[in-house]
Amino acid sequence: MRVRIFAGLILLLAGPAVAQQSRNRAAVDEKDILARCRVSMVRVVTYGVDGASLRMGSGFLVRKNRIATNFHVLAGGASAFVEFDDGAAAMITAVVAADGSEDLAVVEAATGNRPLLAFGDEFRLEEDEMLYAIGEPGDSPVRLIRGRFWSFLEQGIKLVTIRAPLVPGFSGGALVNNKGQVVGVTTGNFYGSRGAAVGISHLKSLLRPFQAIRVPLTSLAADFETLP
């Protein structure tokens, strides 16, 4: 199974002026959104056959004992576990859905009674709407990056892009609207200037019952493909 690492054109756009009142409201919204979402976020740590750490990414709860992340966060790993915001950890016991071409995977891990993130609809996004990327980069706690909706990009799948770059460790995190609803799964940057997320509609399709599988993590081969 191949993983697509998406590339795109560099487009330099000037953002609109933002009034002080809007900035103040954004700050208030950010605190509330982060507080609501952080309990449903995880750090994903993948290990190789030699026990050494391969990579870290993020993920979020979509169903009980089900966590969504990026395919490339897990690919080539021999084992992996998730760390919750409260410090608890759980082993990833299986992959229950995956699509390398969409850079999406859903894994099985004990989540307890932690709340799930609600899904939104990326097709309802409005021009310049403020969006929030949430992830657990490296050894840092859950954090938020805000950026206005830039555009949709078609790279075989629909990507949601924002006017802000993501940082390492945000792969597999949640891109949410001001209601805390997930509209995309963060996957990377376009030349470092625009954050990109796989539209939530792709994850919704992957979660359909008839597509469910249950395979070991080692079935996700590290077979990367860069698309022009």
Image (cartoon, rainbow, N blue to C red):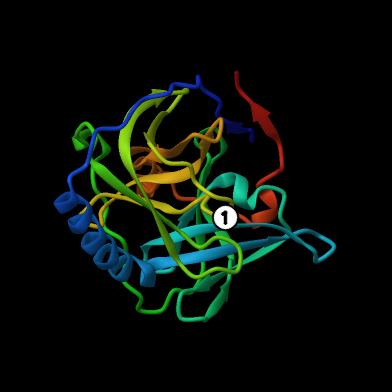
Q: Quadrant of the C terminus?
A: top right
SS at badge 1? loop
**Residue 56 picture quarter:** bottom right
In the image, what residue occupies the spot 49% across and 34% down? 193
Percent across and percent down for residue 214 are: 54, 56
Percent across and percent down for residue 167 are: 54, 50
Percent across and percent down for residue 19 are: 17, 45
In the image, what residue occupies the spot 57% across and 55% down? 169
Q: Quadrant of the N terminus?
A: top right
Please give the residue where the numbered disc 1 appears in the rendered image: 169
In the rendered structure, which amino acid carries the disc numbered 1?
Gly
Percent across and percent down for residue 39 are: 37, 72
**Residue 17 picture quarter:** top left
Q: Nearer the viewer, residue 21 or 206?
A: 21
In the image, what residue occupies the spot 80% across and 64% down? 52
Compared to 205, does 20 lie above or below?
below
**Residue 180 picture quarter:** bottom left
Left/right of residue 217 with respect to residue 41 in the rendered view = right
Residue lying farthest to the front in this orientation:
20
